[in-house]
Amino acid sequence: MSKTSRTSITMPSSANKGAIIEIRAIAQHDMESGFRYTESGKLIPRDIIQVFTCSYNNVEIFKADFFSGIGANPLVIFTTIATETGTLEFKWAGDNGYEAINQARITVS
Amino acid sequence: MNINYPPKMQRRDWLKRIQKLGFIALGSWFSPSLVFAKQEDADEAIKKITGGAAIKDGRVTLVIPPLVENGNLVVLNVRVDSPMTADNYVKAIHVVAEGNPYPNIFAAYFTPRSGTANLTTRVRLADSQRVWAIAQMSDGSFWRGSAETLVTLSACTEMV
């Protein structure tokens, strides 16, 4: 069974055409690095989000690969140009079948 | 050179002193910093990113706090000076830490539609170290910037 968790997107709901908008995307995830040990000395296996993608009306505009060095509850703040009214889809995928999808609408005038 | 030894300093005392020095040397060998990836690992990771191509200094600004209390969540901002037009933009930014057990922290891929090559995220730092940001431009050139930080509480070493 695939895992998922809460995610949240913060971005303007409307923008002028051609404006650069800031998008904040956060996912609830422990991002277990795979370098930590339990008290009994057992290595905790890695469990992280590996890929984050953002597509704007089904065109991929941003992608990020995460490694163990990303902190828990990964937050990414990036920008894009508001080109047209539509939907932005955000997707996180990672170890142990983790997958989360979130969407946000934007009206461009 | 003529050094005035204390009169009672005998061969035995010297041996003892040398032995102590030996223990100090051994101690540094087992220090935790050696458990983490060292510069060579980071260099190798960078080489893998660039494929051996030359990297020029500049255009990349990496901002991390110079003093970090807790290495588990460090706000990192990286931006690259680029017009971000269809024929001149930043393709990717790779962030590599010299002192982490796994040197690569993240890779971000931009498009001309990004508007700016500016990214903020939160990273883990295992040690006081230098962090590198390598940017790949659309023309294939590589640029780099770095920031140094002091970490008082390291990430990854705590028990659960």
Image (cartoon, coloured by chain):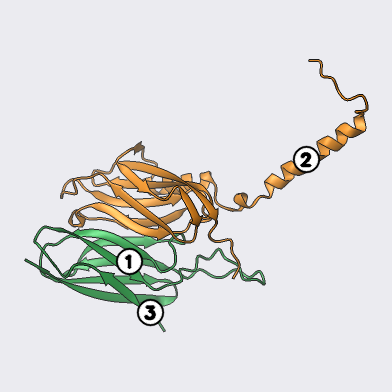
Q: Quadrant of the C terminus of chain A?
A: bottom left
Residue holding disc 2: B22
The colour of chain A is: green
Dividing the image into 4 quarters, which one contains the N terminus of chain A? Answer: bottom left
Q: Residue at x 78, y 15 (%)?
A: B1
Seen from the viewer's position, the closer of residues A46 and B146 is B146
Q: Which mark is residue B141?
A: none
Instruction: Reply above or below: B92 against A10.
Output: above
Q: Residue at x 60, y 50 (%)?
A: B33
Vertical side of B12 occupied by A95: above or below? below
Q: Which mark is residue A4?
A: 3
Q: Position of residue A92 (x, y in %)?
A: 34, 71
Q: Chain of mark 1?
A: A
Question: Element type at marker 3?
Answer: loop
Q: Secondary structure at mark 1?
A: strand
Residue marked by disc 1:
A52
